[in-house]
C-alpha cells in the first residue's frame, strides 16, 4: 500500500517531521511518501494562506495518481482543499483535523484542541461543526506560537504547548487533547506522558485511517458531488490545472 502524505506548506523540514510521524504510525507493508508542494506559503496561518496552498495540494494529488497512490493524508489542521482533492483521487483522502477529532471522540466524553495562533481557532471550530463533533469539543486553545517557531531550537514551544495542554485538562475537563498543527506531531508522546490524558496527533490518526479504508476497499463515493470535476479551460497562472473539453 502506498500512502502519499501531503504537507500543504512549502517548508521541507516540516515535511520531514510529518513524514516521520506517518511512517511511525503506518503498519507493515505500507509505504509512506511525504511530499512538499512546489508552490504555496511557507506556513499556513490564515484563510489567505489556506486558499493559496490549495493549487499546490491538488498538483501533488495529480502527481500521486500517476504514481499509483492508494490513499492520501492532507497534513494541515485546516484541511485545505480536502473536498477538491477527493474529486481528483481514486483512493481515500483524509485530513488530519477530521481524523484527529473523530479519533478523540472514541477516548472520552470530550476533547480540547491545542493549536498555534489564536487567529486559527475559528477555523478549528468551523471544522468541528462541519465534521459533526462540535458537541464533544470542550475548548480550542491557542499557544500564540507561529508555525515555523515550532522548529526553532531557541523557542520554548514544547514548554508552552505542554502548559496549555495541562490547562485544557484542568479547566476544560478534556479527556483527550487534539494537536492542532501537523508540526506538533513529534511532541505527541511527550505530551501524553506530561499531561496524563491521551494526546492525538492528526498525522498518525489520518495515516491509520487511510490504511483502514484502503484495506476495506473503500474510497470516496463518486456518484454525484465527488465525481471527477468537469473538464474545462482555466486561464492565466491556473492554465495547467484545466483540461480542454
Image: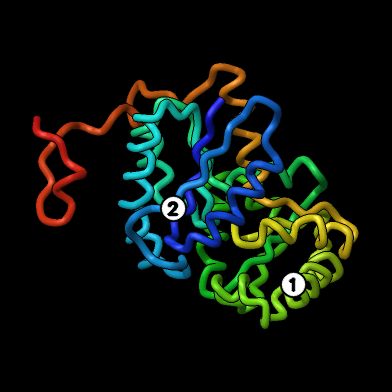
Q: Earlier in the sequence, mark 1 or mark 2?
A: 2
**Mark identifier at residue 158:** 1
In this rendering, which labeled residue sits more in front, label 1 or label 2? 2
Q: Residue at the far top: name it.
A: 217
* Residue at disc 2, secondary structure: loop
Would you name the residue on which mark 2 appears? 36
Q: Position of residue 135 (x, y in %)?
A: 68, 51
Q: Position of residue 186 (x, y in %)?
A: 71, 58
Q: How far apart are the two marked residues, 1 and 2, measured between alpha carbons?
A: 24 Å
Identity of the residue drawn at 29% across and 29% down: 228
Q: Is residue 114 left or right of residue 5?
A: right
* Residue at disc 1, secondary structure: helix
User: In which image quadrant can residue 115 be found?
Assistant: bottom right
Who is closer to the viewer here, 233 or 174? 233
Q: Position of residue 122 (x, y in %)?
A: 53, 66
Who is closer to the viewer here, 114 or 147? 147
Q: Is residue 227 left or right of residue 99?
A: left
Identity of the residue drawn at 59% across and 57% down: 182
Which quadrant of the figure contains the N terminus?
Answer: top right
Amino acid at each position: 500500500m502506498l500512502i502519499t502524505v501531503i504537507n500543504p506548506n512549502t517548508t521541507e523540514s516540516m515535511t520531514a517531521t510529518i513524514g516521520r510521524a506517518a511512517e511511525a504510525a503506518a503498519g507493515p507493508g505500507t509505504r509512506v511518501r511525504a511530499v512538499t508542494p512546489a508552490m504555496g506559503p511557507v506556513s499556513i496561518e490564515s484563510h489567505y494562506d489556506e486558499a493559496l496552498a490549495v493549487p499546490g495540494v491538488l498538483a501533488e494529488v495529480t502527481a500521486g495518481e500517476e504514481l499509483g497512490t492508494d490513499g492520501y493524508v492532507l497534513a494541515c489542521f485546516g484541511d485545505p482543499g480536502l473536498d477538491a482533492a477527493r474529486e481528483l483521487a481514486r483512493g481515500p483522502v483524509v485530513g488530519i483535523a477530521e481524523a484527529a477529532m473523530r479519533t478523540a471522540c472514541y477516548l472520552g466524553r470530550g476533547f480540547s484542541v491545542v493549536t498555534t495562533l489564536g487567529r486559527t481557532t475559528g477555523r478549528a471550530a468551523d471544522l468541528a461543526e462541519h465534521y459533526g463533533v462540535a458537541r464533544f469539543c470542550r475548548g480550542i486553545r491557542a499557544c500564540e506560537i507561529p508555525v515555523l517557531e515550532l522548529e526553532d531550537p531557541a523557542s520554548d514551544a514544547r514548554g508552552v504547548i505542554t502548559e496549555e495542554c495541562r490547562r485544557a485538562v484542568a479547566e476544560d475537563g478534556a479527556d483527550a487533547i487534539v494537536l492542532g498543527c501537523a508540526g506538533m506531531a513529534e511532541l505527541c508522546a511527550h505530551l501524553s506522558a506530561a499531561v496524563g490524558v491521551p494526546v492525538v496527533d492528526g498525522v498518525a490518526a489520518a495515516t491509520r485511517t487511510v490504511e483502514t479504508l484502503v484495506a476495506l476497499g473503500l474510497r470516496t463515493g463518486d456518484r454525484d458531488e465527488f465525481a471527477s470535476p468537469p473538464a474545462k479551460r482555466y486561464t492565466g497562472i491556473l492554465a495547467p490545472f484545466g483540461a480542454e473539453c
